[in-house]
Amino acid sequence: MKELIRALLAVLIVSFILIFIVFRLNSSQGYTSGNTLTIFNWGDYIDEDLIKQFEEETGIKVIYETFDSNEAMLTKIEQGGTAYDIAVPSEYIIDKMIQEDLLLPIDHSKLPNFQYLDSRFLDLPFDHGNKYSIPYFWGTVGILYNTKILGDRELTSWNDLWDPAFKNQILLVDSAREVLGMSLNSLGYSLNDKNKDHLQEAKEKIDALTPNIKAIVGDENRLLLQNEEAAIGLVWSGTAQEIMWENENVEYVIPEEGSNLWFDNMVIPKTAKNVEAAHAFINFMLDPEVAAQNTDYVGYSTPNKEALKFMDEEVVSDERFYPDEEMTSKLEVYENLGKRMLAHYNDLFLEFKMHTK
Amino acid sequence: MKKLSKLSTVYLVIMFFILYAPILYLMFYSFNSGGTMYHFEGFTLDWYKELFGDSRLLIIVLNTAIIALLSAAISTILGVAGALAIYYARRRRVKNTLLSLNNVLIVSPDVIIGASFLILFTMVGIKLGFISVLLAHIAFSVPIVVIMVLPKIEEMNTSMIYAALDLGASRWDVLTKVVLPYITPGIFAGFFMALTYSLDDFAVTFFVTGNGFTTLSVEIYSLARRGVSLNINALSTLLFIFTMLLVVGYYFITKRNNKPGRMGVR
């Protein structure tokens, strides 16, 4: 009995010492002062030096939390036990968040740096007039291929993927809209096509791709492509950039038929506690120099027109990541298809996946 | 026991190698100066330095330890009480029902437990953070402690209790001087089990964290989704070593408790 009590005391003492240390660490970092800003972002999606810079400039302490999928983020915000001041969801989920009344409108008068954004990326179908969201990064969906494995072969179009030479070489992402979108685009239809016959046609077309598919994977595609486990991948441009930093043999292309244009956007959830600081932070991130530094770090494409001037000429003129007007006009933003249509997309994708097994 | 034959030793070595190879691989690359997991360039401790320089990560590590220690301690107390209650339950049906209810909690998927806690906490209005994670961890650790302690109580000779009562011991004396000392090894086993469960739990914690509070497994997960940086390897290495130390500590505690003459009335 004595032994048990002694052990229990030891455990309690150690825990309280640890709690004390954490408390000291927290207060030395300033987390306990009232003026904090809680940011909910994707993992590794900001240059941490910028957070420090923001803290120094404004005296606001930033608490930085990360999520790994839009759905996880949505759940946390929906159920209300949290107080995030800023979140960075993708565009298709913003539509949903607006409909479910989870966002606060953004006061544009507090964002003098808003003018630096490229008008191409404003006033889009998911949020007309940018009432609730400010673009953070944008990108495309395209084909990443390894020139070392494929030799001189150049890929330019979605239809190239159906070439029998690429047997068991392609990695797809496990996402209904990307995969069906690829097929729809290759047939010349819109990514947001609601015609069931067109969709059936698209589904049959990807069924025919089966022999070329090596696997349908999630985020691990980055490592697989980087390590040259597969020659071709359907990827987001950001992933492509990261792979290209690590492996010189890969090439990224936005197929000529067109593709998806996606956005990650800063929003202020309804549960925000420090709306003032949230605006200050959004404005800070829109500053051209800050945006340029952040873009250098993250590697995605920035919607900030002025920021491009502060960036490496080589990066900015890279058509793979900053496509010209003609190419951007072929890119489509996902529209909210409605529950029924989305379910139909998912069903078709599921059928396709079962077909491949 | 018969000495192991050569073949079975070889088999054992291969088996352990397969089981530990991924961990060793990961640990090996935590010393890589190259920055990737497939090409070893040179030895460096930079990842460890980066790790200790990151105060946010340090806070997360400490939080994880605090949650583990506190939840293990509290759930051990509750679990021992629960095990005793099950033991003393007179009717067989009550006993079996209690035990089954306990076991259901162990086998039910973490995801369901996590999701139901999330709903519960939101309904009751508990803010997600330290308290919610602690409560959830206590809740899933209690059944484990019960399972670890119960066999020890069952194997206890009931005559000891009757003898103590005959010799004038009160109920309280019986509990503190006979029963608890006898089941101490079981209690420690339960405590360490709860500790490791809490340390490595991901699914439940994932649901109930929020407001700036995270534990290590959740943090590693969200880091790893965006491509693994080698400081995760460094962190995992440290965590692995820490777990090894726990196992060794547990070994010595049980060994000491099993020495003849140290059991029973003290």
Image (spheres, coloured by chain):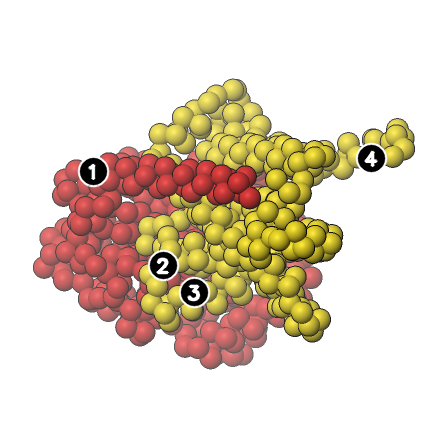
Chain colours: A red, B yellow
Mark 1 burial class by Cα count in 10 Å: few <14, some 14-19, many 20+: few
- Please give the residue where the numbered disc 3 appears in the rendered image: B118
* Chain letter of the residue beneath label 4 in the structure image: B
Find the distance from the CA under tag 2 to the CA under tag 1.
29 Å
Query: What residue is shown with label 1?
Result: A53
Q: Nearer the viewer, residue B83 or A311?
A: B83
**Amino acid identity at mark 1:** Gln
Q: What residue sits right under mark 4 in the picture?
A: B11
Give the x, y percent position of residue B174. Answer: 60, 52
What is the CA distance from the residue labelled 2 to the residue labelled 4? 48 Å
In front: mark 2 or mark 1?
Answer: 2
The label shown at residue B128 is 2
Q: Can marks 3 and 2 be said to lie on one chain?
A: yes
Q: Residues within 10 Å of mark 3 (few under 14, many from 20)?
A: many
Say which amino acid is labelled 4.
Tyr
The kind of residue on which mark 2 rests is Leu
User: Which comes before the other along the chain, label 3 or label 2?
Assistant: 3
Q: Secondary structure at mark 3?
A: helix
Horizontal side, residue A357 vs residue A78: left or right: right
Q: How many marks?
A: 4
